[in-house]
Image (tube, rainbow, N blue to C red):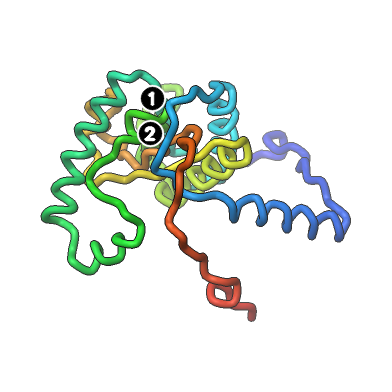
Amino acid sequence: MHESDREPLAFEEKPREEMIGRSERFYRTMRRRRTVRDFSDRAVPREVIDNALRAAGTAPSGANMQPWHFVVVSDPGIKREIRIAAEAEEREFYGRRASAEWLRALEPLGTDENKPFLETAPYLIVVFLQKFSRNQAGERLKNYYTSESVGIACGMLLAALHLAGVATLTHTPSPMRFLNRILDRPGDERPFMIVVAGYPEAGASVPAITKKPLREITSYR
């Protein structure tokens, strides 16, 4: 990279107490984030979705290739088509593919092959991983660290939606190639995740689960 291709870092250092306070507030906000399976069909402002996707698009990526594409689905007919295809795969998963151990692990969460939220929620954000990009000349370029990069972008998307007051669910039926067909995406893109976004249904409940404490997930050396 040439010196002329660089720009000053826009970094704002915070006083110590403000740093600690910001980190505590963010943690308290994020610990209230829960996966929702009972969605309302109430509309969410499109601007909120757009801004959350802009935030996701700022994620770091291998060689800054930004190997992601987000398809925002609100059309009822397309959502219905996605639900039918996803539930077909889920019936195979719960009926044949999943091991007994896996099904036991899922049992406390109460999940099954029925996915009504794919139709009810106002938005499905389908995330595609791009193994390749193209330059201005149309030449195909390899992308790097694609799973890591897209995973980070998805995490930032979930955080942005939660901070804006939008409930979410991550859905990953396997396999997901039906999404390429339904959404007319290139064959060299891999469906990575469906992020279901909307308001929770009135009276919605979630499983009573806990998260591992800091001492179990962290080591300091």
Looking at the image, residue 27 sits to the left or right of residue 87; the answer is right
Foreground pick, 119 / 22: 119
Numbered badge on residue 126: 2
Q: In this view, does 213 lie above or below 144?
A: below
- How far apart in space, not on screen, are marks 1 and 2 (Cα)? 8 Å
Residue depicted at 57% across the width and 72% down the height: 213
* Quarter that holds the N terminus: top right
Which of the two labelled residues, at mark 1 and mark 2, occupies the earlier sequence position? Answer: 1
Quadrant assignment for the C terminus: bottom right
Is any part of residue 156 visible from this angle?
Answer: yes
**How many C-alpha atoms fall within 10 Å of the one at disc 2: few (<14), some, or many (≥20)?**
many
Residue at 73 percent across and 56 percent down: it is: 23
Q: Where is residue 106 in the image (x, y as percent from the top left)?
A: 30, 60
Callout count: 2
Dot 2 falls on a residue whose secondary structure is: strand
Answer with left or right where residue 169 lies relative to residue 98.
Answer: right
Q: Quadrant of residue 87?
A: top left
Q: In this view, does 114 lie above or below 70?
A: below
- Residues at discs 1 and 2 in contact (Cβ within 8 Å): yes
Can residue 141 be spotted in the picture? no
The x, y position of residue 122, in whole percent, is: 43, 26
Q: Measured from the top left, where is residue 207 in percent x and y? A: 43, 56
Position in image of residue 89 (x %, y %): 18, 43
| Mark 1 nearby-residue class (10 Å; few <14, some 14–19, many ≥20) | some
Badge 1 is on which residue? 73
Residue 168 located left or right of residue 87 = right
Q: Which amino acid does label 2 sit on?
A: Val
Amino acid type of disc 1? Val
